[in-house]
Amino acid sequence: MDGDRLYTIGEVARRTGLPVKTIRFYSDSGVLPPSGRTRSGYRLYDLAAVVRLDLVRTLRELGVDLATIRRVLAREITVSEVAAAHAKALDAQIRTLRLRRAVLRAVAGRGSNEEELELMRKLVHLSDEERRRIIADFLDEMFEGLDVNPEFAAKMRAGVPELPDDPTPEQVEAWVELAELVQDPGFRRRIREMMEHQARMRDRIRVPDNFMELADLIRERVEAARASGTAPESPEADAVVDELAAAYAEAYGETDGPEFRRTLLENLRIGTDSRAERYWQLIGVINGWPEIPTLTPFFEWFIRALEARV
């Protein structure tokens, strides 16, 4: 194109590949004022106008509105500032689309009904802060009015579910299940009972540093006992109970005996609940933690064995 020549709207359309109707709309909108007119009043455009039109087209294809384009052309804001703002907006749109995709995949996998679909939609579209608030409010109610061990409370509050920007269907399902769980009255009563017991025993109960080692020991010994057909009430279980009780006594800095075993039994009864375990497993799925094994059946066996002997 000649830098000094003026071009008709038809020539500009052929040069840019844009419809005449679109170029006329931009002209009427003030985004692409004509560089001149023919004697008959037809619009003419110079090379600078064509370059300007290329910029307008590019910005429009990126989703920039005409009002913002006018500000760019008037040099009120820079192209880089517009790009940064729209990149941020696109990030939000992409995140929303990913969430929608995860919800749809979860719905397809679960065969969800309309009510569950609506629940999923509402929960995943909450902000991160709103999702954290659901768990924080739950814990606030569980701890309300109780003088619990600060370290224990801190560990409970540290387990905050953080749904990623691109969640898997499993993470969406886990979040929905978690939200339903913390709103279940029966679950709330059970967790409150645990918190009240912890508050009553706060000076006598602490989570031993080797808690996971104890849990693994219980799983290994009980798994072997169950595999051999040993019932928790049977004499054959004596050796298992003695070993596990002694391991707990050592972890707590106590001496194994009838009194210690009564206290241990009470603590295990209160603290063992499949739904409480599921609570942490769901948070683990949402946060992408390593899989948290199911240990409740092994603790239940140990509880029955202690009950038969205390």
Image (cartoon, rainbow, N blue to C red):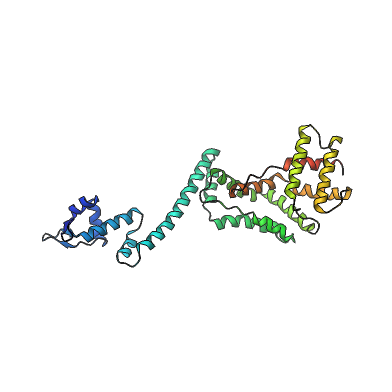
Residue 302 appearing in the image: yes
Relative to 288, is 302 on the left or the right? right
**What x and y, as percent, mark residue 206?**
77, 55
Relative to 95, is 154 on the left or the right? right
Judge whether 236 appears above or below 182 on screen.
above
Between residues 19 and 292, which one lies in front from this camera angle? 292
Relative to 220, is 62 on the left or the right? left
- Could you say which quadrant of the image residue 75 lies in? bottom left
Tell me the residue at 76%/43% (across/down).
217
Judged from this view, the residue extending furthest toward the bottom is 76
Judged from this view, the residue extending furthest toward the right is 258
**What x and y, as percent, mark residue 108?**
51, 39
Judge whether 139 appears above or below 175 on screen.
below
**What x and y, as percent, mark residue 90?**
42, 54
Tell me the residue at 32%/61% (across/down).
69
Tell me the residue at 79%/42% (across/down).
302
Residue 265 appearing in the image: no
Judge whether 199 appears above or below 106 on screen.
below
Judged from this view, the residue extending furthest toward the left is 39
**What x and y, as percent, mark residue 244?**
81, 44
Between residues 308 and 248, which one lies in front from this camera angle? 248
Relative to 279, is 21 on the left or the right? left
- The quadrant of the picture occupied by the C terminus is top right
Between residues 219 and 205, which one lies in front from this camera angle? 219
Numbered marks: total: 0
- The quadrant of the picture occupied by the N terminus is bottom left
- Could you say which quadrant of the image residue 129 lies in? bottom right
